[in-house]
Amino acid sequence: MDGKILTEASPVVMIEGAHYAMEIVYYNSKGERMNHEFTSAQMLPIHQHFFEVKSYTDTKTQQESTDTASLFTYTYRDTDPEQVPIGDLIDEKNSTKRSVLTDNPLGLKGYFAPKKAYAKYDIRVSLFHVLRGTKNKNNQQGEFYAFNAPGDELKARSTTDFSQKIPVQVITSISSGGEEDTARYYKEIADYYGITHERVKALIDEARDKHDSATYWM
């Protein structure tokens, strides 16, 4: 998203069956990256991002629903250190130690997987800051709340350091194969953007050519 102002008229466009990475970067008043502050031994146990949806609209029927539990999944993929992609050397000159995944959900890095096509909704991204105890469920070590369901007991002992809505529209689903479903896939993308099927295919090929997974941290 890189500084782009997101609105309902210009949402994040997703496709059911694909995966989408997101990294959240915080800066201080001097413009300095400050993500490392949330990963310290003192701050990590009391901070966690949650990704909640209150309702969604079926874009085919225009019906609204509050049954949002199965709209998408989110997988926490935070690394230690946070700024070094998984598997990369932490200090190339002085150490052979490499960055690893953490088992403590924070949400500075992670990926979404839409599970319902033809849906429009806002994802509320919230950074919880726990004031009493830890972010663990009922303060039980090793037990955490799901990405989209912070418990009432956690809400009662937390404040919110950051909150932002991300508008999302899932415009189609990945093709299941065969000429008919492949044509459906390209048509639905073309219709959304108001372009031709041929242009869709060209853009997909261009994106594939430009893809670089050298620093892939999933």
Image (cartoon, rainbow, N blue to C red):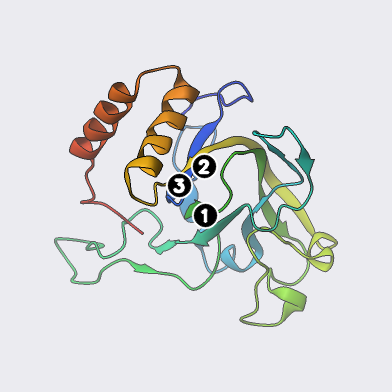
Residue sitting at x 71%, y 52%: 68
Give the mark toward the camera: 1 or 2: 2
Quadrant of residue 120 within the rendered picture:
top right
Question: What whole-number distance in Å separates the C-alpha atoms at marks 3 and 1?
Answer: 15 Å
In the rendered structure, the answer to whether residue 121 lies left or right of residue 92 reads right
Q: Residue furthest left?
A: 93
Residue sitting at x 23%, y 39%: 208
**Image height of 130 relative to 165, above or below:** below
Q: Residue furthest bottom?
A: 141
Q: Give the residue pinned by disc 3.
A: 23
Amino acid type at image mark 3:
Glu
Residue 153 position, x and y percent, is 83, 68
Within 10 Å of disc 2 (Cα), the crowding (few <14, some 14-19, many 20+) is some
Residue 104 position, x and y percent, is 53, 70
Q: Give the residue pinned by disc 2.
A: 26
Query: For this rendering, which residue is in front, 25 or 211?
Result: 211
- First in sequence, mark 1 or 2: give its number: 2
In the rendered structure, the answer to whether residue 75 lies left or right of residue 151 reads left
The reply to whether residue 6 is in sight is yes
Within 10 Å of disc 1 (Cα), the crowding (few <14, some 14-19, many 20+) is few
Pointer 1 and pointer 2: residues touching (CB < 8 Å)?
Answer: yes
Which quadrant holds the C terminus? bottom left
Number of the label disc, if any, that sits on residue 170: none
Amino acid type at image mark 1:
Glu
Query: For this rendering, which residue is in front, 70 or 58?
Result: 58
Residue 134 position, x and y percent, is 70, 71
Residue 133 position, x and y percent, is 75, 72
Q: Secondary structure at mark 1?
A: helix
Give the mark toward the camera: 3 or 1: 3
Amino acid type at image mark 2:
Tyr
The reply to whether residue 2 is in sight is no
